[in-house]
Image (spheres, helix red, strand yellow):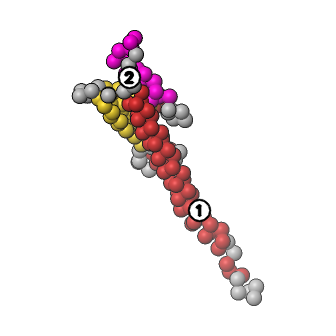
């Protein structure tokens, strides 16, 4: 019986070498997809919270600029875990008694160097906008 498998030395190593890159691609793809979705959900929640903070009833000593600043602070407060250098929060008043909070974020991928080496983009720009009416 040992003579039957005598010529197959190294077959396991060869199969492992062929399957490992595909397996790692799948695992890193799942991890990065999860991280990008988490980043998007984080900035979406931050934009909603910023808009909500901007529609709160004003106090006597807080004007529109003060409420816009409070909306930006509230949005940035919910972005813990994200790179603050890649985050941009814009608060506007489009008219009609509304406030609009736009949060832009650039999510850098773990496998960015590999993706860049093959000619791809190692970062994904994410954007979310929340608009609420001031009541």
| Residue 105 seen | no
State left or right for residue 104 relative to residue 80. left
At a point 50% along the width and 44% down the height, the residue shown is: 38
Residue 17 figure quarter: bottom right
Magenta stretch: dominant secondary structure: helix
| 124 and 76: which is toward the camera | 76
State left or right for residue 65 relative to residue 76. left
Please name the residue that numbered disc 1 is placed on.
20
Residue 62 picture location, percent across and down: 39, 14
Residue 75 within the segment the image draws in magenta: yes
Whole-Å distance between the Cαs marked 2 and 1? 58 Å
Quick one: SS at disc 2? Answer: loop
Question: Dot 2, crowdedness within 10 Å: few (<14), some or many (≥20)?
Answer: few
| Residue 115 seen | yes
Residue 94 within the segment the image draws in magenta: no
7, above or below 33, in the image: below
Q: Nearer the viewer, mark 2 or mark 1?
A: 2
| 14 and 68: which is toward the camera | 68
46, above or below 67, in the image: below
Quadrant location of the N terminus in the rendered image: bottom right
Question: Dot 1, crowdedness within 10 Å: few (<14), some or many (≥20)?
Answer: few
At a point 72% along the width and 81% down the height, the residue shown is: 6
Residue 126 picture location, percent across and down: 40, 40
The boundaries of the magenta stretch are 60-77
Q: Earlier in the sequence, mark 2 or mark 1?
A: 1
Residue 22 picture location, percent across and down: 53, 62
Residue 48 figure quarter: top left
Residue 134 picture location, percent across and down: 32, 28
Please name the residue that numbered disc 2 is placed on.
57
């Amino acid at each position: 019986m040992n003579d039957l498998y005598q010529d197959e030395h190294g077959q396991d190593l060869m199969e492992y070498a062929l399957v490992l890159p595909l397996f790692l691609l799948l695992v890193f793809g799942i991890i990065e997809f999860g991280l990008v979705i988490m980043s998007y959900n984080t900035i979406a929640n931050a934009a909603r919270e910023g808009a909500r903070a901007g529609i709160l009833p004003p106090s006597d000593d807080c004007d529109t600029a003060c409420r816009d600043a409070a909306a930006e602070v509230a949005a940035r407060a919910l972005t813990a875990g994200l790179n603050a250098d890649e985050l941009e929060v814009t608060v506007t008043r489009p008219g009609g008694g509304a406030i609009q909070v736009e949060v832009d974020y650039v999510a850098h991928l773990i496998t960015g160097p590999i993706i860049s080496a093959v000619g791809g983009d190692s970062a994904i720009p994410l954007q979310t906008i929340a608009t609420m009416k001031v009541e």
